[in-house]
Image (cartoon, rainbow, N blue to C red):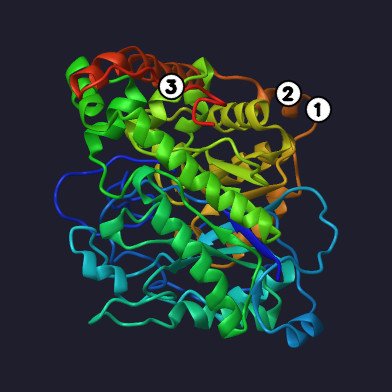
Amino acid sequence: MRVKVAVQLDRRIAPGPRAGRRDEWWYPAATPPPSPPRPRGTPRPAHAASAYDDGMTRGGIAVGVLAALALLVPHAALARNTGAVAPQAALPQQGTTIGFWAGEAVPGTDWDSPSTYWKRRDLQAYTPYLWRVLRQNQIPLYFNLRYKRDFGPVPPGEPHRRDGLKIIRRANRLGVPVWAWVLIPYSDGYWASEGAAAEQFAATRSLVSWARRKHVQLRGVALDPEPRVRTPFETAAAIVDGGSDATLSALFQQSIDPLGQCAAWHGYARIVRWAKRHDVKIAAAPAPAALDDLKNRSLALQDATGFILPKAPWDELYFQAYRSVFTYHWGRDPGSGIVSSYLRSARHNFGSAGQISLGSAGRGPYRRFSRLLNDVRLAATLGAREVPIYSLERTLRSYGGPRALLRLVHAAQRPFAGPAASKSTAPSSRASNLRAAIHRTDIAATVNTPAVTAGHGAAQSPNRWPNGCG
């Protein structure tokens, strides 16, 4: 048996009980812009007005997201295979492709109410026209599959949902590439946070067994490493803006724990080793703060925020360069420069494995579809292999249905050239200022670690990159 895996991060939260999805930990609900005019010759989209997560109004670190390169499985191969998470016959890739996080439209979700994790998905977006666009353009889906809901042991009294299985099977029948984006119950943190390594490992192994039993084909498993669900707004805002001394001090006292960080490091590195032993391709889509954390070769910022990206043989790393999320926390749009800045940092630290994800569709600066199209072209200009976008449902809702996917595919195939390429990829002062503010938080966490840990019993220094937990 062969298997594949993948991973993701972001945030600001408005006060009060709300429902949640991946990027809304950072955002209040937003009114979508008017649909752009239909390009001449483009088929009329099937309307999917109710096919998005309006029922969830809570906020989340989006971000997550992830993805890795996935290509078509021949129908004959699907007919022969008994089901697996496995590499399949691939067509040659040409240029940059796009993908989508999908399946997180679960109306009624409320992170303050853990039982809402088991609510039904809204699948009305998955029209015949959408499936045709996905199939003809080989657009990968990174579909939200929930441990102990869609697969794995379901707790007594909670429903075993099959709405996700329905989508996976249809994708298989049509030859649409599909990954499993694995999440765990809200009470366990939802994302792949520092304290959730054991649960994430159990979920990954369970997912692979589930795929075989259900005779479905998955391109890989997508993990989502970022802080626990419901991390306070003040925490995210302080990290992005450099933070006040009082806010950062409270954060550090609660979260800094170098020994606990190393335990999480080993836990997540174990998942990667397991994947490699089983010929699994594994990727991650971490919070972008992981890149800011490495500037001083210390892991204090990740320790303070409650997640860890271990040094491990990841196949792909899709860092969440979520321009909309940064705009919300920072109070101003860092511009396209934040996309190119994080892509360059990803490559500098992780070589060809370093990539980015974009989001959140329809939010902040991306209320204007032209800006998302521009940033996809920018990523293509810088040589991104695949650009996963959060999310499919948001994109359909905000930009006029499946035709928006066609425009994004077209944008990925049209990198800037000549003077336009130089201008679009040039460093920007706004992006540099934003990352400098985050770096100040990193320095503060590094400097305060000995004092914080001394107060908890024994002074410790921050763990070092790349071998501090080795």
Q: Is residue 74 above or below residue 13?
A: below
Residue 463 showing in the rendered view: yes
User: Could you tell me how far apart the alpha carbons at marks 3 and 2 are, in whole angstroms?
Assistant: 22 Å
Q: Are marks 2 and 1 in contact (CB under 8 Å)?
A: yes
Q: Secondary structure at mark 3?
A: helix
Residue 2, picture quadrant = bottom right
Outermost residue toward the top?
447
Query: Residue tagged by mark 2?
Result: 422
Query: What residue is at 60 percent from the left and 79 percent from the top?
Result: 212
- Residue density around tag 2, few if under 14, some if 14–19, many if 20 or more, within 10 Å: few
Quadrant in the picture for the N terminus: bottom right
- Residue 121 screen position, x and y as percent: 38, 75
Q: Amino acid at mark 1?
A: Gly
- Residue density around tag 1, few if under 14, some if 14–19, many if 20 or more, within 10 Å: few
Query: What residue is at 44 percent from the left and 75 percent from the top?
Result: 151
Q: Amino acid at mark 3?
A: Leu
Q: Earlier in the sequence, mark 1 or mark 3?
A: 1
Outermost residue toward the bottom?
79
Outermost residue toward the right?
92
Q: Nearer the viewer, mark 1 or mark 3?
A: 3
Q: Are marks 1 and 3 in contact (CB under 8 Å)?
A: no
Q: Secondary structure at mark 2?
A: helix
Query: Residue tagged by mark 3?
Result: 434
Q: Is residue 249 above or below residue 6?
A: above
Query: Residue tagged by mark 1?
Result: 418
